[in-house]
Each structure stands twice: as structure tokens, then as C-alpha cells.
């Protein structure tokens, strides 16, 4: 295994261990937001490297996030945090699967 791969594995292991080590919530928030932006920019990098300009994946990502936030807001008042998160996760997964399906069927 090369030293570059080993350093990448160690970096990922450290990031996964940060919540267990008692890191501050602010730094965890920064790490999570950085990971989200990395995912979006990596997808854009793949598209632009192939010579395509497509912002569709960003729109579907935003739709899933928006529906997840709405579900948490509506359900958090009546259910526990775990129930609210699991229901919002299910809704956002369905939205990220269902919205492109409906658009691709051209209904």
C-alpha cells in the first residue's frame, strides 16, 4: 500500500473518530459541511471533466435536503428526535428517487 493511500485511510479514520473523542460541535459542523460541499464539487468535477455542463444533480440534492428539513420541522413537535430524523431521512430518500423518476417519465 502506498503512503498516499495510507495517509488517506488515516485521515478518514480520524474524521470518523472525532465525535467519539468529544470534539466541539462547531468543528463537527464544519467537518460535515465540508464533506457535503466536497460531494457536490466532486460530482461537478466529474461532469465538467467529461465536457458536460449539467446542474441536475445539484437540483435533486437541493430537493431532497429541502424536503428533509420540512419533514423534521413538521414532525419534531410530536415525535422524538430519532423518529423525526428517521422519517425525514425516508422522505428525502424517496424524494431523491421519485422526483427524477417522474421527470424522466415526462409526465
Image: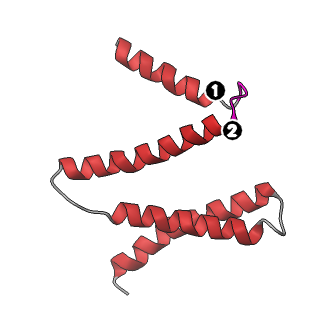
On residue 53, which mark appears?
Answer: none
Instruction: Find numbered disc 1 in the image and state the secondary structure of the residue it sits on.
Output: helix
Q: Which residue is mark 2?
A: 25
Q: Nearer the viewer, residue 8 or 31?
A: 31
Q: Main secondary structure of the magenta part?
A: loop
Q: Nearer the viewer, residue 26 or 106?
A: 26
Q: Nearer the viewer, residue 12 or 93?
A: 12
Identity of the residue drawn at 49% across and 68% down: 63
Q: Is residue 9 above or below residue 78?
A: above
Which span is picked out in magenta? 20-24
**Residue located farthest toward the front when viewing the structure as drawn:** 26
Can residue 1 be seen by looking at this rendering?
no
Q: Which residue is mark 1?
A: 17
Q: Quadrant of residue 74?
A: bottom right
Instruction: Find numbered disc 2 in the image and state the secondary structure of the residue it sits on.
Output: helix
Q: Earlier in the sequence, mark 2 or mark 1?
A: 1
- Mark 2 packing: few (<14 Cα in 10 Å), some, or many (20+)? few
What is the x, y in percent for residue 96?
Answer: 49, 65
**Residue located farthest toward the bottom when viewing the structure as drawn:** 107
Identity of the residue drawn at 34% across and 50% down: 43
Amino acid at each position: 500500500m502506498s503512503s498516499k493511500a495510507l495517509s488517506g485511510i488515516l485521515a478518514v479514520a480520524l474524521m470518523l473518530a472525532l465525535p467519539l473523542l468529544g470534539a466541539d460541535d462547531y468543528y463537527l459542523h464544519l467537518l460535515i459541511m465540508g464533506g457535503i460541499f466536497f460531494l457536490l464539487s466532486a460530482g461537478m468535477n466529474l461532469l465538467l471533466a467529461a465536457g458536460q455542463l449539467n446542474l441536475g444533480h445539484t437540483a435533486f440534492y437541493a430537493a431532497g435536503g429541502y424536503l428533509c428539513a420540512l419533514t423534521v420541522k413538521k414532525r419534531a413537535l410530536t415525535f422524538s428526535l430519532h423518529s423525526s430524523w428517521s422519517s425525514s431521512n425516508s422522505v428525502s430518500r424517496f424524494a431523491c428517487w421519485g422526483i427524477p423518476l417522474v421527470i424522466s417519465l415526462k409526465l
